[in-house]
Amino acid sequence: MSEKFSQQRDLFESERSFRLLVEGVADYALYMLDPRGVITSWNVGGERIKGYSPEEILGQHFSRFYTETDRANGKPARALGIAREKGRYEEEGWRVRKDGTFFWASVVIDPIYEGGALIGFAKITRDITERRNSQLKLEAMQKQLAESQKFDALGQLTGGVAHDFNNLLMIISGSLHILKKSAADDPKLERAMSAIETATKRGAALTNQLLTFARRQSVNPQAINFAERVAAIREVLDAGVGSSVRLDFDIGSDAWPIKADVSELETALLNLVINARDAMPDGGTVTIGTRNVVLNEPPLAGDFVAIDVTDTGLGIPSDVLDKIFEPFFTTKPIGKGTGLGLSQVHGFAHQAGGTITVASELGKGTTFTIILPRGTDAPSRETSGTPLRGSGTVLLVEDNPDVALVSIGLLEQLGYQVRRVADAEAALREIESNGVDFVFSDIVMPGKMDGLSLAHRLRQIRPGLPILLATGYSEVAAGVRGDFPILRKPYEIHELSEAIAKLPR
């Protein structure tokens, strides 16, 4: 008799210890359901996670933890059915607390049998909202890294091709200026050269978009008053949208200046406006607006200006959104687009130290947002741009003999005497033995010193010597940071003249 009593006492103590353990677990909601899903036990974890005291929840159906949509779809009953048929039910999903807030739950339901009969279910719920948010953030970062690596690879390819093509365009466009003199009295020759010039400019524009996408474009960042810049190109923007689309503006009077390259900003804005126009075949409205924003999540931390370009068009399908910034990707018919417009905008925004985002809803329109750094200097003013003839001696530093020949011809047309060397070391020797009025050097050159290193060296040994740099693109050009003026290849004679006229004397 004492042995039986002892066994009963041990069983009682075991059950009591287990009950205390279950009731004391705070990180998990551990409770029992009867075969219909009515709650028959409750622990402190359930109260902490879901907000109900035992008095409030015992005797209630467990379906109250589900969202209205899940209840309407019969999910609670289906969960018990699966647990009964398969021996276990597991899932992750949204659940509802007593106060109506949602949390992401990990749920396990096990059927409990006694003597072969189902007597209820054991249910374990854990709040894993924080873990889920961390996982989603990690996945977003991994996706962003993968996108960045993809764009970097595409950028290396397109940038290399565009750089070589720019030198060819430089030779073609520069030679045209020289040939024009002999074509003054020949209408047929004039027409032919005009066609070549038009094709060259088109090629230069496409190459420029490729370089911008590749973030290898040589840029001259400066503080820009966005309202003034938009006013200056208003006619171009109006022409871009056409007659069936209305162009509205929402540019605040308190908008900060933007730090960016003027030409690249204008091109990006025009590309977005034209893209918006094409998304509204039956007409609509394009709105250009600005907002001052302060960001604090690296790498974008500090003061920025957000430029929104919003249309009321067709919207972008979700399966297309991930591809829209890739070069040559387009949904437009053949002949209606190169697929480089949005690539240029993407490259420009990132090279300027900002980013671009897109939000779209089918049938309701799209908003592209370019986020650019705030400019800290006073916005620059336009120059007259009138080509001027000059005089004096220029040292041309250019390793490509064909490009050098063209550059010499343009400089001589402007009235300069030209001495040409092929690398930085030869340039230093030339300056040591013969004086010049200014130096005009390419940035990318063979040898131990590139054009930028040469410019810094000359500033040390000849502080007052004017220096003008040129490049189709160069990663080292990003290090110039306004220390030296940069002329983009391919350049025309009036651009060369204007750049020389701005050199400090």
Image: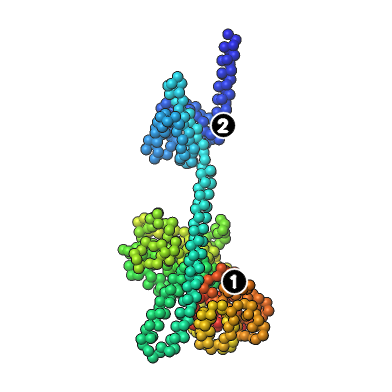
Q: Residue furthest top?
A: 1
Q: Nearer the viewer, residue 87 or 448?
A: 448
Q: Amino acid at mark 2?
A: Val
Q: Is residue 340 left or right of residue 374?
A: left
Q: What's the distance in space between the residues labelled 1 and 2, CA to CA? A: 62 Å
Residue 412 visible from this viewpoint: yes
Element class at badge 2: loop
The residue at the point 55 percent across, 70 percent down is 474
Q: Quadrant of the N terminus?
A: top right
Would you place residue 112 above or below residue 223 in this image?
above
* Residue 254 visible in the picture: no
Q: Position of residue 57 (x, y in %)?
A: 47, 30
Percent coordinates x, y for residue 339 in the rendering? 41, 65
- Given this view, does label 1 or label 2 mark the residue nearer the observer? 1
Which residue is label 1 attached to?
480
The amino acid beneath tag 1 is Val
- For marks 1 and 2, the one nearer the N-term is 2
